[in-house]
Amino acid sequence: MARGSLALSLLLGLACLIVIGAFEENLPPRTISSGKYHEAIKRLQSFKASITRHDSIASAPSPFSPSPSPSPLAFQGVYNPRVYHVTSYGADPTGNSDSTEALLAAIADAAKGPSEGNLIQGIKDLGGAQINLEGGNYLINRPLQLPVTGVGNLMIHGGTIRASDDFPGDGYIIDLSTSSNEKSSSSSSYNFEFITVKNLLLDSNFRGGGISVINSLRTNIDNCYITHFTTNGILVQGGHETYIRNSFLGQHITAGGDKNERSFSGTGITLQGNDNAVTDVVIFSAAVGIMVTGEANTFSGVHCYNKATGFGGTGIYLKLPGLTQTRIVNSYMDYTSIVAEDPVQLHISSSFFLGDANVVLKSTKGVVNGVTVVDNMFSGLNNGVEIIRLDQSNSPFHQIDQVVIDRNIVRGMKLKATVAKRSMQGNGTSWTLDFNNVLLFPNLIKNVQYSLSSTGSTFPNHALRNVSQNRVVIETNEAVNANVFVAVDQYLAYDVSIALFLLQIAFSIEEMCDQM
């Protein structure tokens, strides 16, 4: 019986090869379009597998019964992997001819392919469909857009795309937005969800930008190299949770010290939305590394050496006066500064500032609240540049609260902080300690703690007598040889004027008691 089954299996395999070969030979020439060729071959292979399956043989009523004829329905429901190879659509992987139409055709098929239900309401789940660039180099003359909105779970990956000389100057190579001639086909408030752009080199050819993400949700940009842009390397506008990771952006391909650095223009990344993250990203040439106008964004492992601040460049510009809600950690500001307008809730820590790079708090309406700049390293060029600088050219800061600048390590720059400590020794009745060279804000001390130790045999009365112009005055009721230690800060919500008033009352009471 076993030998009979084996013989039948061999006969069926041979018959299958004959059937498949005859089927392929009888195909009329060029009756299958390039876009459907791979699908037809996959169906033929599936048909072959269905004939030779062991379980099909085992379920036959008799080992000598002829195999049933394949039903036309056998071709229906066959799993078709959702990988769209752009060369199958006629794209030229050498970059010698234009591939715009071929790439758009592959994107259209992927976007209009079968779905697996929905992601967020109104966004069709494409089940992880992939547009595979197959490691090719493709030339395009207009932006690559999805033909419909309301789709998600789609990836574009694995190659190089370059803009042609007639690419629109305001376009983006990959444009995740609603095209001008398309009405939104989605009931969602977002255009797209979970679109991934990965392992790509995008060359804008000094014609526009690299990637635009408009009103999209949970977008991934990973391991991309974006260059030769004139507007933005990456533009994120509206939407929610775009994650940019492990990528390199530069208008010009350089590694620092470029003789044309003063002429760099454009912006590496522009974030005009909330709740985004930029992680392990290098911006090596642009006028502005990252421009931020949306709240609740986070930056980690960012290295900006795009254009030195001394040449007019900025590493990270936070243009969010009144509500910043931004975190910058573990980053490297390489000759480029961080500028924050009227910052409210800003945290900068564990970062390295090189070449006089610093943090600039810029006043527009005089507000700075909830700012922490702590545990950073600053290394300068001995030019007297302050690690934290106040730009009050528009208006002075007058609403200052909960600003903590402390525990920063400084070399070759001028230390500025909201916390300071000093001590002095002398013989007399008055000790004045000046904190202006360290404290960030002028004429602002919110809390004072001091101690006085005397080497004499008497026990002098002493008190805090005056706090003004960032100076502290300690006085005793008799001349003594003493050491005075004073700690001040500018951030504790503590009313110094009331404290001074109470201390003066206490001192007066002590004097009255001594006279009695």
Image: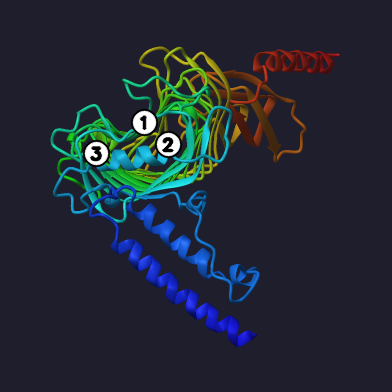
The image quarter containing residue 302 is top left
The location of residue 109, given as percent across then percent down, is 38, 40
* Sequence-first tag of 1 and 3: 3
Q: Nearer the viewer, residue 388 or 150?
A: 150
Q: Amino acid at mark 1?
A: Pro
Asked if disc 1 and disc 2 are in contact, CB closer than 8 Å, the reply is yes
Question: How far separated are the C-alphas under marks 3 and 2?
Answer: 16 Å
Q: Is residue 472 above or below residue 331?
A: above
Residue corresponding to mark 2:
112
Q: Residue furthest bottom?
A: 3
Q: Amino acid at mark 2?
A: Lys
The location of residue 440, given as percent across then percent down, is 48, 27
Residue at disc 3, secondary structure: helix
Viewer-side label of 1, 2 = 2
Q: Which mark is residue 147?
A: 1
The location of residue 406, given as percent across then percent down, is 55, 37
Q: Is residue 246 visible?
A: no
* Sequence-first tag of 3 and 2: 3
Q: Which mark is residue 101?
A: 3
Query: Residue drawn 54% across and 27% down?
Result: 122
Residue at disc 2, secondary structure: loop
Q: Is residue 14 above or below residue 505?
A: below
- Relative horizontal placement of residue 338, taking residue 254 as reference (left or right): right
